[in-house]
């Protein structure tokens, strides 16, 4: 069945449709409301900004990807060698040659911090906050915030789509939770068989409308008993489902057979099966994310692999994860650039913390919340640079600490969400979504 799953102006830009309506200037545009709606829906991604967030499940080894420490002792340095990228002075791991060729379109983040205790949880990646001291209902993820503040770019495509399948460790399978914003702003999570339910089958649209009307009347009877807004959330899900069913736009986005063979080959397939209690290493999810934002999604999250290499760190990274990650992410970055979407789509790939500088007795690296890394691309950001640095051992931040919340603040600004935006928690108290964090000036 079709379902939504989840738990509980810049100056100089053109005014949005909502702003035009608010100031009563519709008549001066020469367009009627249906014209505006049709124009907005026909523009595709060019009419809205979008974020693709890749959660690297279980926390990858930062010092074996973007921050190799060749001057460190052997027990810290590891066995991987650096290779030059197409940006002089930026070297990355030898097992990411395709990303090396598109480094001018990327920004390695080498000093990400904020994980409070090294516990596995995707929460900080999706929200920019820790799980401690949350407001009533919990912090909402980026996708839920965007759903609440900006709504759908087109009615037939949910604003927030999560490609993460459930995992053995629940946080590994989370697409980002709606927190105090409620189920109405949870991620739309399609699964394989459910895709067939994204279009009407054997039922006329008039009959569907009659059913919707009957359900609305039944809901009205019990609304007085609803004290926490659950019905409102369910109503929004039902409206979204109807919009999806009466349009083929979302179903078309999931149909990868419509892509040219050479594009599909550039992304590769990877492995669709889950890796341990983590996520698949599915390279087609990168392509699917691109198609979804083109169709109208504002935020797409996907979970990749299981990078918790407490043993055999180097063989695991080299043989089971880095080649697929390198192919899928590099193909996405190149594809967005080729299609002229680099200014409209921001991409962020990261895990919840870094790994220990010292290699353990099992040739693995353990949890290291002091510092980790990530990679950001697109978004019209100033790319081809590195932000932050760690010390000689990759153990501590040496230059420009980057909090998860600062990256979220940069994504908010890119999406057009004000730095001081607030939303009410379940007690009705307004909460600053970003807290005290502000965007990274280096990206401007």
Image (cartoon, rainbow, N blue to C red):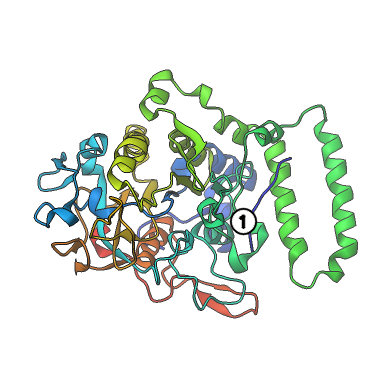
Say whether residue 249 is visible.
yes
Q: Is residue 263 left or right of residue 242?
A: left
| Image position of 221 with respect to 423: above or below | above
Q: Residue at x 37, y 37 (%)?
A: 320
Task: Find residue 7 and report its image quarter.
Answer: bottom right
Q: Residue at x 24, y 49 (%)?
A: 64
Q: Position of residue 69 (x, y in %)?
A: 15, 54
Q: Residue furthest top?
A: 261
Q: Which residue is mark 1?
A: 186
Q: Secondary structure at mark 1?
A: loop
| Image position of 179 with respect to 161: above or below | below
Q: Position of residue 166 (x, y in %)?
A: 58, 48
Q: In terms of depth relative to the viewer, which is nearer, 1 or 29?
A: 1
Q: Is residue 409 left or right of residue 356?
A: right
Q: Is residue 326 left or right of residue 384?
A: right
| Image position of 254 with respect to 117: above or below | above
Of the 4 image quadrants, the one containing the N terminus is top right
* Number of other residues with Cα within 10 Å of mark 1, as a class: few under 14, some 14 to 19, many 20 or more: many
């Amino acid at each position: 069945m079709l379902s939504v799953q989840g738990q509980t102006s810049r100056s100089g830009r053109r005014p949005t449709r909502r702003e035009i309506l608010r100031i009563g200037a519709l008549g001066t545009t020469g367009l009627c409301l249906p014209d505006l709606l049709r124009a907005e829906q026909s523009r595709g991604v060019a009419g809205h900004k979008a974020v693709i967030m890749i959660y690297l499940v279980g926390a990858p080894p930062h010092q074996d990807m973007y921050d190799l420490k060749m001057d460190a002792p052997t027990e810290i340095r590891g066995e991987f060698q650096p290779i030059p990228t197409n940006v002089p002075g930026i070297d990355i791991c030898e097992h990411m040659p395709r990303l090396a060729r598109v480094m001018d379109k990327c920004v390695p983040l080498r000093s990400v911090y904020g994980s409070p205790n090294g516990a596995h949880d995707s929460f900080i990646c999706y929200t920019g906050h820790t799980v401690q001291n949350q407001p009533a209902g919990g912090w909402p993820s980026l996708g839920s915030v965007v759903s609440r503040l900006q709504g759908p770019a087109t009615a037939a495509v949910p604003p927030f789509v999560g490609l993460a399948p459930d995992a053995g460790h629940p946080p590994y399978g989370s697409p980002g939770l709606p927190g105090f914003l409620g189920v109405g702003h949870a991620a739309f999570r399609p699964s394989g068989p459910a895709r067939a339910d994204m279009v009407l089958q054997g039922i006329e649209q008039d009959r569907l409308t009659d059913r919707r009307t009957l359900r609305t009347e039944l809901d009205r009877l019990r609304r007085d008993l609803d004290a926490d807004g659950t019905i409102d959330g369910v109503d929004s899900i039902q409206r979204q489902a109807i919009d999806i069913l009466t349009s083929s736009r979302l179903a078309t986005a999931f149909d990868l057979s419509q892509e040219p063979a050479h594009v599909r080959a550039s992304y590769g397939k990877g492995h669709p099966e889950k890796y341990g209690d983590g996520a698949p290493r599915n390279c087609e999810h990168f392509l699917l994310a691109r198609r979804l934002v083109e169709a109208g999604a504002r935020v797409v999250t996907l979970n990749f692999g299981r990078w918790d290499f407490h043993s055999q760190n180097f063989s695991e990274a080299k043989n089971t994860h880095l080649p697929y990650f390198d192919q899928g992410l590099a193909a996405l970055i190149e594809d967005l650039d080729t299609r002229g979407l680099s200014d409209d789509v921001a991409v962020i790939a990261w895990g919840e913390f870094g790994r220990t500088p010292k290699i353990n007795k099992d040739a693995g690296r353990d949890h290291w919340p002091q510092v980790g890394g990530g990679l950001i691309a697109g978004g019209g950001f100033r790319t081809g640079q590195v932000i932050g640095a760690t010390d000689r051992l990759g153990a501590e931040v040496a230059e420009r600490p980057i909090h998860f919340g600062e990256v979220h603040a940069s994504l908010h600004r890119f999406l057009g969400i004000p730095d001081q935006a607030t939303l009410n928690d379940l007690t009705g108290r307004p909460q600053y979504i970003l807290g005290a964090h502000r965007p990274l000036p280096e990206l401007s």
